[in-house]
Image (spheres, helix red, strand yellow):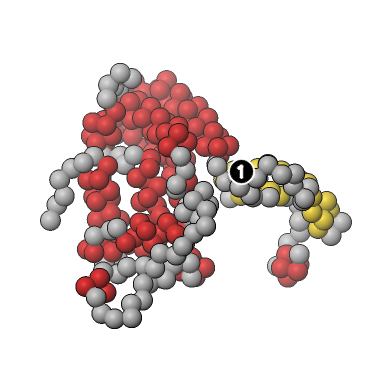
Amino acid sequence: MSWMTQNKLKLNDSKTEVILIRSKFDHSPSSVTNINICSSVIETNSSARNIGVLFDDNHTFQQHISSTCRASHFLLCKIGRIRKYLSQDSCATLVHAVVSSKLDYCNALLFGLPDTQLHRLQRVQNTAARIVTLTKKSDHITPILNQLHWLPVTHRIVFKLLLITYKALNGLAPQYLRNLITPRSLSRTLRSSDKCLLHIPRWNLASFGRRSFTSAAPVLWNSLPLNIKTSPNIDIFKRRLKTHMFQRAFSLPQRH
């Protein structure tokens, strides 16, 4: 509250939400049912919205994915009704503006989720691709995504994480993100010394620790080719990274 007072902010009771995040295997009754802030009593909820993302008490993001899919399908239905009046390029631009933006929004938070959850978002992208290209539901989706040059959902998540990592390492992200990753320090010179590797910390829980930025970013970063990690600017990095991710997603031969 002192921070809010210093910045001349006031707590809005009707918009304040509190959740207690814990393991999904913990079924014991919660000892925290509400918190008192000044004269306000805020009850704990099973989910809370923060910067447009629905966080749940088990960090499964099921409600957020459901909300994203519901909103995206509604928009795709509207686009499908006017598709015959649009060229393919115009339709693709519209889909990127109103649907792909929803799939990509804060999608780094979804890293490490079960495939069953991410497949729901992939179905949204598949539907969007079929609307853009006017292909049938029975047609295989991989050649369509390849034709459109669209990365699948799981690869878009990895792309976002690696982009944030590059920004953090090059002073283009907030300092608190830079503090979460550490270059690997070696006691003696090895062949891997000049490969721009990051230290991979240990984690306790696969459900939380493995998905955290501190653990996920170094694992993904260390797997990149050196020419991508040493890109001189962010535009070149994004171009090289997308080419690399595209080759991995569609099993294309690597370029040298």
Q: Residue furthest right?
A: 39
Q: Please provide percent x and percent y for residue 232.
A: 26, 68
**In the rendered image, which quarter contains the C terminus?**
bottom left
| 22 in relation to 142, above or below | below
User: Would you say residue 231 is visible in this rendering?
Assistant: no
Q: Residue furthest bottom?
A: 188
Which residue does the numbered mark 1 point to in the structure image? 25
User: Would you say residue 227 is visible in this rendering?
Assistant: yes
**Amino acid tagged 1:** Phe
Residue shown at the point (37%, 45%) measured from the top left? 156
Q: Please provide percent x and percent y for residue 161.
A: 40, 54
Residue shown at the point (28%, 54%) measured from the top left? 241
Q: Please provide percent x and percent y for residue 154.
A: 38, 42
| Closer to the camera in the image, 229 or 105 | 229
| 143 in relation to 9, above or below | above
**In the rendered image, which quarter contains the N terminus?**
bottom right
Crowdedness of circle 1 by 10 Å Cα count: few (<14), some, many (20+)? Answer: few
In this rendering, the count of numbered labels is 1
Residue shown at the point (46%, 62%) measured from the top left? 202
Q: Please provide percent x and percent y for residue 57.
A: 64, 45
| Closer to the camera in the image, 234 or 203 | 203
Name the element at disc 1: loop
| Quarter of image, res 93 | top left
| Closer to the camera in the image, 38 or 12 | 38
| 228 in relation to 190, above or below | above
Residue shown at the point (44%, 67%) measured from the top left? 181
